[in-house]
Amino acid sequence: MESFQQYMDEYCEQLRRGVIQKAYKGLMEYIMKLRTYFRDKYPEYCVPSSTYYGYMDMTYFPLFPKLLKDRGLKIAIVFVHEACKFEVWLAATNKQVQKEYWQLMKDSHWDKYQVLPSLQGEDAILISLLVENPNFVDLDALTNQIEQETVKFIKDIENFLSAH
């Protein structure tokens, strides 16, 4: 196993090359624009100005469609750094609500999306892949793909909740 010092030596070397900073800055700018896009296009969703930047593990911003917000639920559009992919999560505003809706979805055997096998150490209830290996050359097409899949995910969840 490498030591903390060895990790820091490699980290500093990578930073000296300058590529990581440029890529990270570009990614954060894109995520902020994506959040603004959802806020402006979907005024019926509450889209807070906050973005969670994480520890280079994940970066996300929340959306609160009214039906979900009224139940203590939220949507998170998540970039998973190591896997370099975008996901959409159904999450809750607290652990009690998370457990309640996780149990409901698990007990209903709803298989439209992956219900997490356990909540231990998890923030999500459901996870769906939006884009694997995103193409950052055409940001409009990427935004369109994320938007379409996210809106579908929200509608599917709203339909499920309305039926249960």
Image (cartoon, rainbow, N blue to C red):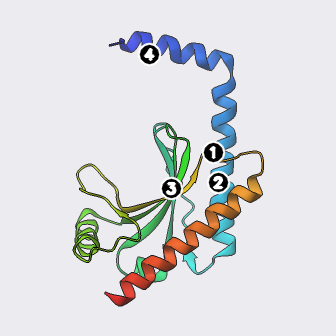
| Mark sitting earlier along the chain (4/1) | 4
Q: Which labelled disc corresponds to residue 7?
A: 4
**Circle 4 SS class:** helix
Question: Are dots 2 and 4 in contact, CB under 8 Å?
Answer: no
Q: Quadrant of residue 142?
A: bottom right
- Spatial CA distance of label 2 from label 4 is 29 Å
Kind of residue sitting beneath label 4: Tyr
Check disc 2 and report the residue beneath it: 32
Kind of residue sitting beneath label 3: Glu
| Closer to viewer: mark 2 or mark 4 | 4
In this view, 128 is above or below 58: below
Expressed as whole percent of the image width and height from the top left, the position of residue 125 reads: 33, 63
Kind of residue sitting beneath label 1: Met
Task: Report the front residue among 65 and 117.
Answer: 117
Check disc 1 and report the residue beneath it: 28
Expressed as whole percent of the image width and height from the top left, the position of residue 42 reads: 63, 76
Looking at the image, which residue is at 36% across and 12% down?
A: 2
**Circle 3 SS class:** strand
Expressed as whole percent of the image width and height from the top left, the position of residue 151 reads: 57, 73
Kind of residue sitting beneath label 2: Met
Decide: few, some or many residues near mark 3? Use Cα within 10 Å; few <14, some 14-19, many ≥20: many
Q: Quadrant of residue 91?
A: bottom left
| Mark sitting earlier along the chain (4/3) | 4
In this view, 135 is above or below 140: above
Check disc 3 and report the residue beneath it: 87
Question: Are dots 4 and 1 in contact, CB under 8 Å?
Answer: no
Q: Quadrant of residue 148?
A: bottom right
| Mark sitting earlier along the chain (3/2) | 2
- Spatial CA distance of label 1 from label 2 is 6 Å
